[in-house]
Each structure stands twice: as structure tokens, then as C-alpha cells.
Image (spheres, helix red, strand yellow):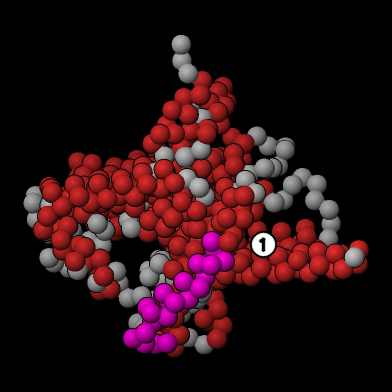
Amino acid sequence: MTDRHATPSWLRVAARRATGRPQQLILLFAVPALLVGYGIVAAVLNLQLGVDSTVYRSGALTLLHGESLYDLTTLHYEPYWALLPFTYPPTAALLFVPLALVPNQVAWGILGGVSVLAMTLVIRVSVAQVKRMPTWMSPARITLILAVLLLALEPVWRTVSLGQINLILMAMVVLDVLVVCTESGGRWRKFGGVLTGVAAAVKLTPLIFVPHLFITGKKADGFRALGTFVVLQLLMFAAAPHDALLFWGKAVSDPGRTGPVYIAGNQSLNGLIARLSSLAPWTLQAAIAIGLLLAIPAFVLVRRFHRQHRPLPALLVTAFYGLLVSPVSWSHHWVWVVPLVVFLLSRLPDHLPAGTGRIMRLAGLISVAAVFGSCVLILIVPTGAGIEMYWDGWDFVLGSAYLLVPVVAGLVFAIRWLRRRMARRRTEESTA
């Protein structure tokens, strides 16, 4: 007899609905199939596709041939149009080995297709987490519609076009934290934290979700995530000791391998301060200091959402805090806007009373969509050749649009908290 609790309930329901509606399956796989097909055509025509996926594939080939990932600035297997350093841990090259089995362009198509499916999974999990969504549409239909519409967001389409893995890593974290690490994880519950550890082994930034697990009371999952990350690093010390020593001893702290931090595409506190200070030597130290200060309200918000049994906004706080404090947060790293849009949509129920609250919620959703869908960092602000360090006032505002989203959201939460506290105090004084 099968165990009904072995599979998360939301996944069983989604599977039944998809089976009953084959047209939804066709729509679900339409875009991924097109991407893979285009990758095959591009391979035949020898087109230049996927700069970052080409670097991933070259890293895998380099590892397989026993060559060094970090001795040189670029890899031997990179074509002339994708000469970039390998900036990831050696464990990433190991996990990219399947890409070495196909041509560059096909690898791009596969990564793109998997990325779109990963984004769809994030949307579906996020829809299942929020308390309310429009009642006139089923969760499956909302998921498919958003999966198409949100392709227009710059972090999403740039991730796909570059052959990046941001959507895949986000899906691993979302599935792990919001499903596997919960009671609905079923028999997979004992593996909670593993996906987060693997994601961190590919790209170090998901390490921010390890303390998130501890803060939200999932200590065993936090230890599993940390243990998975450490075990994978030790594996590479045994399999490729030269690369492991080079990465952790030098490459991980080499700013030259990540590219210029001052350009507009770097939407982190470090990037903002670098632009404001014209690359002053204390830039990183100032960013770290501000990040430590912001850790306090971030911790408070995560704990507050957790105690209110609202895991999605708690996870979003950690994700956007990580984007702010990371030394480099390229615009395509901001794919966490996808579950943010789902959360903001859930704040717009079918019958919302007119007034300031309704206007504020609509304004929040429209503002987020406008910021991340307008290509402001590409089409509006001047970029390139170090011009970012000569921006005027409005250029700095528009050129910092992504990182201003969590900052403004934090200020809104702080103002609302202060107003409610003052109102409560006035009520207590009037009844005293």
C-alpha cells in the first residue's frame, strides 16, 4: 500500500489537475521545448549562445581533463566570445559535468528550459504558501499565466539569455525551505537542508539561507545544509586538491575574477558605495558595516513572519537581504522578484475596500513590476566605460532601482510598525 504522506499534498493535487488537463501540460513545457529546440538549431548553425552556460561547460571540461580552473584568468575550452574566468567553487564544475556531454548551444537550451520549469515550480510553491489568491482562477492556471508573464522581468529573461542558473538555485532553495523542511515534505523531510547545501556548493550566495533555517527553528535542516556544503567541499579537496586550495586560498577573494563592482549591473550595497565613492579603498568595509546594521531589522522581520506562520515573506526577507549584502549582486541575481510578485498579488484579494490601503498595495505591485520589467539598468541610465562614477543625482536613484526595492519595503514595514505601536499606546492611555 502506498503512503499518501510520502508526497506533499499540494504536489498530489497539482498532478491530478495536470493529468486531467493535458493542455496545461502542453503549455507548461512549450517554452522549455522551444528553448531546447532553438539550442539544437543554434548548434547546427554554430551561433553564439549562452556566455555563462559556456563558462559552466568549459569548467566541467577543464575538470574532466585534469586542468586547473583558477591558474589562468580564462579557461582553455572557452570560445573567443565567452572568455570569462571561472568564479564558482570547484564543486560547481563537478555538478556541471552533464553539460559537457552536449554542444555549447544545446547546453544553453537545456539550462534555459530547466530554468523556466524551475521558475514555474517556484511560482506554484509560492501560490500554495500564500493565504489567498484571486478566487476566480485555479492555482494551476495562475501558475501558468505568471510563468509566461514573468518571463518579461529583466532578471528572468537575462538569466535565460545568459545561460545562468539563478532560477534553478532559487527553485532548489524554495522547494527545500518551504516544502521539504516542513511537515508537508513527507518522507523527504529527513533530507531537509540538503538542496540548500547543494545550491550553496554551486554558488556561495545561497549560504545566506543556512542561518535562515536556524532562525526559523529548523536546526536539524540547518546542520544538514551546512554539512552537505562542507562534505562537497571536502570531496573536491580529495578529487582536485590544487583547485580547491586555489579557490579557497585566493580565487574566492579575488575581485578581478568577478568583474568591475562599480558598474550599474551590480545592484548590491558594495556596488552602490563603489559608485558613490569612486572606488574608495574602504568601499567593501563600509558595505559590510551597513550590512551588519541591516542584519538586525532583517532578523526581526524573519522572526516576526515565522511566528505569524508566514514562511514565504520570511524567506523573501532573507533572500533580499542576501542580495543587498553580497559583494556582487548582478541584475540577473534578482530573480527573487518572482516569488515577491506572487506575495504582492496575494495582498490583492477579490474584494479590497477602497482607501489608502488599497492604493498602497496596488502601488507596491505596480512599482515592483515597473522596476524589474522596465530594463531601467539597460535602457535608461548611462552605463559603460566607468561613467557610473560620474552619475548625477537622478542617475544614482534610477541606477540603484533594484536595491532600493527591499530598502523601501523595509522602511514601509518600519513606518507601519511605528504607527501601530503609537496607536496602541494612545488606546492604552485613553482607557487608563
The residue drawn where x is 36% and y is 75% is 261
How packed mark 1 is, by other alpha carbons closer than 10 Å (few <14, some 14-19, many 20 or more), is some
SS for tag 1? helix
Q: Is residue 266 magenta?
A: no
Left or right position of 7 against 41: right
Q: Total number of numbered labels?
A: 1
Q: Position of residue 45 (x, y in %)?
A: 25, 49
Q: In the picture provided, is 261 more to the left or to the right than 117?
A: left
Is 155 positioned to the left or the right of 308 in the image? left
34 over 393 or under it: above or below: above
- Determine the residue positioned at 37% across, 84% down: 282
Magenta segment, which residues? 277-299
Q: Nearer the viewer, residue 259 or 188?
A: 188
Foreground pick, 251 / 18: 251
Q: Nearer the viewer, residue 36 or 101?
A: 101
Q: Position of residue 349 (x, y in %)?
A: 74, 47
Tell me which secondary structure the magenta stretch mostly adopts. Answer: helix
Give the x, y percent position of residue 212: 47, 53
* Amino acid type of the residue that numbered disc 1 sits on in the rendered structure: Gly
Which residue position is annotated with label 1? Answer: 364
- The image quadrant of residue 427 is bottom right
Q: Residue at x 72, y 37 (%)?
A: 136
Residue sitting at the far top: 1
Q: Residue at x 67, y 62 (%)?
A: 364
Q: Is residue 309 above or below residue 368?
A: above
Most foreground residue, 334 or 142: 334
